[in-house]
Amino acid sequence: MDQNEIFKALAPIVGEEDVTVDPVELLAYSSDASQLKAVPVAVVRPENKEEVAEILKFADKNRIPVTPRGAGTSTAGQSLAYKNGILMDMVKMDKILEISLKDRIAVVQPGVIYGELNKELRKYGYCFPPDPGSAIACTVGGMVGNNASGVRALKYGATVDHVLGLEVVLPGGKIIRTGGRVWKSSSGYNLTKLLVGSEGTLGVFTEIILKITPIPKYAALIVPVFEKFDQSLEAATEITNAGILPSAMEILDDLCIMVMNSFLEEKLPQAEALLFIEVDGNNQKAIRDEANIVRNICEKLGAKQVIQSIDPKRTEELWNLRHTLANLLAKIRGEKMAISSIMDFAVPISQVPQAVREIKALAAKEQRLMAALGHIGDGNVHFGSAINVEDPKEREAATKFSRQAAESIIKKYGGTLTAEHGLGQAKSHLVMLEHGETIELMRGIKRVFDPHNIMNPMVMGLTEIPEDEYIYMPGAK
Amino acid sequence: MDQNEIFKALAPIVGEEDVTVDPVELLAYSSDASQLKAVPVAVVRPENKEEVAEILKFADKNRIPVTPRGAGTSTAGQSLAYKNGILMDMVKMDKILEISLKDRIAVVQPGVIYGELNKELRKYGYCFPPDPGSAIACTVGGMVGNNASGVRALKYGATVDHVLGLEVVLPGGKIIRTGGRVWKSSSGYNLTKLLVGSEGTLGVFTEIILKITPIPKYAALIVPVFEKFDQSLEAATEITNAGILPSAMEILDDLCIMVMNSFLEEKLPQAEALLFIEVDGNNQKAIRDEANIVRNICEKLGAKQVIQSIDPKRTEELWNLRHTLANLLAKIRGEKMAISSIMDFAVPISQVPQAVREIKALAAKEQRLMAALGHIGDGNVHFGSAINVEDPKEREAATKFSRQAAESIIKKYGGTLTAEHGLGQAKSHLVMLEHGETIELMRGIKRVFDPHNIMNPMVMGLTEIPEDEYIYMPGAK
């Protein structure tokens, strides 16, 4: 079916202004926060579930791939179209439908921006806590699709821990509901939790019911600076062993500190690592006590400086710095460079020190400029390599490096390819490493929901194709 | 295939002493904590995953139904065999394989008793928190199969929130692993969370990896007694609105209080309701403060007496009373009676007062002796009706009552049939009420894992049969 016919079929469903086949506009939709590129055959912006159903009915009948897309902040290419596929931009379904304090839930459309939802919830003293790095831009639908999380997942859980119910349009156009407004259920297979993290491969979310969480009254931030990287790992372990569950425990390595210093007035001492440790709760005295225990542990283990803040404004400033770090890092080799092959491994908690050391050594060996940062409390560490994405040699080397790192993480440390970013198109070729034969069960489940394999078919290794067909080379294809 | 042939096939796999077709022994396996009865064709007790695989290979080839069984404490008949089916007793796979404080996980076999695991974990200051009513008897495998939970789910979550990975034998005998020792993953469909709560319909768990949780240092229990049932519901709402997340918030109605009083030395005033509210944490002062806030709310709302305990021994005594309540209630009409049609509804939190009032009124109308108790904090209330299970008329009336209550709960209040007990055989006939068309997706998923439908085929409404074929009449068939 050619582009013109697709336009003619979609225009009566959503109106001409909400379907586009204009090459310039399509190009604007050809990338996300990964380094991949894929130009869709058409972009369509439905406004309600009925329009979504009509679009999927048409696409299913004509076997046209469809990729639902939120804000396009995914780092692994899961919000890109594939081969003559339709990109379904959920931007017009961006309403907060209900905030119910009595049921402690929020009901939203998928296109609502995470930061906007939390701004609204804050008025009532509540939040939806997963807090991904892309908080100010990403959509809740995208978060549900990827089981996103971030710095506060350690204490408050990932997206999957907060989704109570979904309205979903299946490929044939059927509209179903899973779960609901109840907080607890053991009734039937947990389709809701299966759909969370399914990366648009099973259907399109049109309504999302979320648990909401009271915002704790008090928080303290402790930022210890460590001469040696290993000291910081030791501190993280000791804090947990002391029975403290921080609301966040982040690690940043020397490269991150260097970058932060170029933006901080009051410079941090250049060192191998620092931690961002936040404790929170409703009792100010208890929080102060906990913060002091954390501080003492860090000092005992040789922290050369400890910044401590209980002032919300100062705390926010420090956090903002942490949140913009990924963007700052992208510039360390100059404006044209980009952090590519961002890796999002998690390993069992005890394996963090060894695994991080191994990957840093691997990078050092090939003189790769690489930053390590992440959520050390739950074993999730990101590695970002600054490469020139225009240079095929650098791309190839980065891809090789990622695979080597992935093999170590999985085979040697029992880790996972992705703790919070999703597999997307970028990691599809690595799926067998982690999932082996269980991929067949996943493919079977996909067939149940999507018999003609039209929903985002190229992610998560769900479509069996020769390895060189996968799009995983940054910038390739 | 006759019983003798089955014996001959299974004996070489597990040894003659671990397979039985003896009618007396089979009878002992014909019931669980529901009122249903089903005599298996054979009982087999495998010792390791290889034996499980051999048994499932044989059963799959010969199309013999298999039901895995833990301690048989399920209240909805999910641990019973079905029509000439094999019951697989997991009693011999009862090892705690590993407790890793460094990874904050426990690795166990399915047959380990929940209470035993927690006794072992307590030595290290940790626990696996879901705390079902059958804590001292139920197995961890059964809990995972049913997504069990209990009084502490409000703060600490249900079983599904604690399972990180599974080893599972599929019907054909293939052994797979899902998840692992990592705390966070967004890699592929979440098969682990799909398997939790699958009631033995997808495969047999042979290894379970659990998150473990530090035991909080301090806890306070507040037990307010309310003249009016509605006051207690109001108190529960106000406590939550005050930003307090209790580790437990239980409600017991007048019938429960009457029964408790017959066992307490220091009698409670007879009243319409009491709450068990527990707050816990690592800061003693903060816990005392929280307990006082809770107490003040209860007194402000007219509690006529408030029992408060921060003494661990006294607290445990009070909790023990709560935990034995279900058994005590069974005796209120005399030794031969039993609580039957235990209902395990959950509704959205705001709907609890109305839903509870409606079901109590429904019971009063037909002069049904019925107790209401449960986990009011997360909207999960149990209703237990004391009936003579030997009397077909009483059974029929109880079944009718359950269906009527279920219809209200689901259609009027947006609730779920079961918050923590599972659907089992007992609630299979009600599944369409709650799940409608999505049952087809569940059936499709079952076919992916179990193409010949041998795994516990009669639970969860997964096998499409005429309604009168379902076993839901207490004591029938």
Image (cartoon, coloured by chain):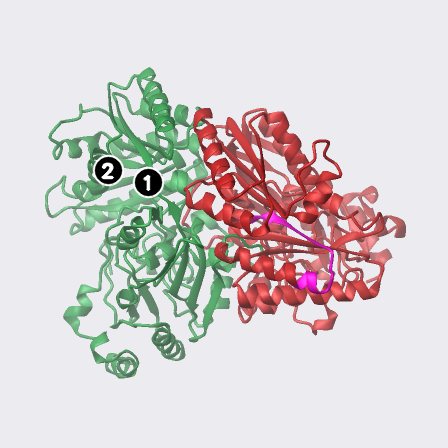
Chain colours: A green, B red
Residue B219 in view here:
yes
Instruction: Answer with left or right where residue B312 lies relative to residue B48.
Output: left
Which numbered marker is on residue A151?
1
Q: Mark 2: which amino acid?
A: Trp
Q: Position of residue B162 (x, y in %)?
A: 52, 42
Which numbered marker is on residue A319?
2
Mark 2 touches mark 1? (CB < 8 Å)? yes
How many tags in the picture?
2
State the CA–CA distance, disc 2 to disc 1: 10 Å
Q: Residues within 10 Å of mark 2 (few under 14, many from 20)?
A: some
Q: Secondary structure at mark 2?
A: helix
Q: Residues within 10 Å of mark 1 (few under 14, many from 20)?
A: many
Marked residue nearer the N-terminal end (2 or 1): 1
Residue positioned 18% across, 40% down in the render: A329
Quadrant assignment for the C terminus of chain A: bottom left
Q: Secondary structure at mark 1?
A: loop
